[in-house]
Image (cartoon, rainbow, N blue to C red):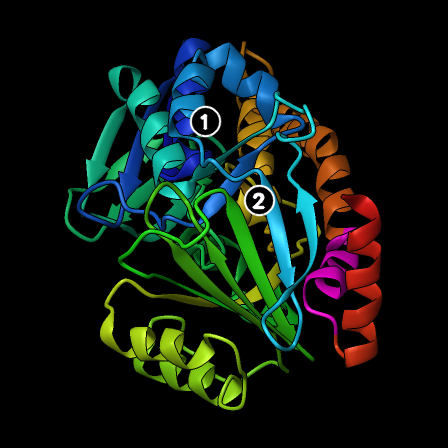
Amino acid sequence: MTAVLISGAGVAGSTLAYWLARHGLHPTVVERSRGMRSSGNPVDVRGPAVPVAEAMGIMPRLREAATATTAMSILGADGAQVARVRTPAARGRRAEVEVPRSDLATILYEAARPHAEFVFDDTITALRQDGAGVDVVFDRAAPRRFDLVVGADGLHSTVRTLAFGQERDYVHHLGLYVATLPLGRPAGRPDEVILYNTPGRLVSIHPVRGAALAAFIFRGPAIPDLDYRDTVRHRQIVRDAYATAGWETPRLLDRLDRTEEFYFDAVSAVRLPSWSRGRITLVGDAASCVSLLGDGSSLALAGARALADALAGTRDTADALRDYENRHRRPVAAKQRNVGFAAASLVPKTRLGIGTRNLAAKLLR
């Protein structure tokens, strides 16, 4: 095997391209957008992702790009602070780093770019495979043949839909929605994340790096036929969910109406019985999305390295893909099992739940 097509130039795609090239394969990355594009939402590089980043030599750049947060401040119903919890870095866990997702994606892309072919402003429209390879049809470029195709194209993966079937069969709503938007100003507290809860709803302000980011995370049932590109409807969903919320929420909703840089999606888990179909496989969120609390990026780094290592050498492709899946499913399953606990801690359903969470937070400081 020599030629591998990767769909998606995000965290998983660029990491995979880097390691495939290191193993002597020839990766091509196709990306729908015209250039590097990712949200500024903060994500963590921790756990199994840290040795991957260290081996790529990018940890110094990640530390330069890191946010400066040292604590989370939890506010009560009146907006007064009721608890303050230090971040892992502030407690001396220096191996972990929190960075804006856009910076992480860019640093990974720049590490992979000298070793891989990147094709922007294009996407896959059809896949036809046989025992020896995959014929790929693109929206803009001429068709090409590859030994393997990897979907690293996120929660709403095109490759997964083409090879495995409709999204509704594999993407499972976890009872929450998330929306984020930049505030266009520095945060009032440059080293603290602010959390304000009402039952079933969270508003947070993250300082990022001098440019504050607001997030709305709220509980709600699955919305039938929700189009993840329909930003007009997304704004209305958020406004309706927070119509009666206090604190700074009304001002944040005003900003929501005025910004074009707005992200919205359901908090979801991707579950498939197998991540591979013949010579087509998945990695990162396309295979096993773990929304909430930033674990997805760390798992994407670790999963991409695991897939590249499995494909190294001249082993049978099917055996390599089974090895990758056997190795990486364990950490993914553990994180997916913990999503319910994370949701209960971050967005308690009731006032009693909020009070219990706040009391626990006071004991952590």
Q: Is residue 333 magenta?
A: no
Give coordinates of residue 287: x percent, y percent.
58, 47
The residue that appears at 40% across and 71% down in the rendered structure is 228
Please provide the residue range marked out in magenta. 337-348
Q: Is residue 299 above or below residue 18?
A: below
Residue 113, label in figure: none
Which of the pair 294/85 is nearer the observer? 85
Single out the mark in the foreground, 1 or 2: 2
Q: Quadrant of residue 303?
A: top right
Q: Is residue 129 above or below residue 78?
A: above
Q: Is residue 343 magenta?
A: yes
Kindly report the distance in space between the C-alpha atoms of the residues bearing marks 1 and 2: 15 Å
The residue that appears at 84% across and 66% down in the rendered structure is 356
Give coordinates of residue 27: x percent, y percent.
35, 24
Task: Say whether residue 91 is left or right of residue 130.
Answer: right
The amino acid beneath tag 2 is Gly
The residue that appears at 55% across and 23% down in the rendered structure is 305
Residue 16, label in figure: 1
Give coordinates of residue 286: x percent, y percent.
52, 49
Q: How many discs appear?
A: 2
Task: Say whether residue 116 is left or right of residue 223.
Answer: left
Whether residue 54 is visible to the viewer of this picture, yes or no, is yes
N-term mark: 1 or 2: 1
The amino acid beneath tag 1 is Leu
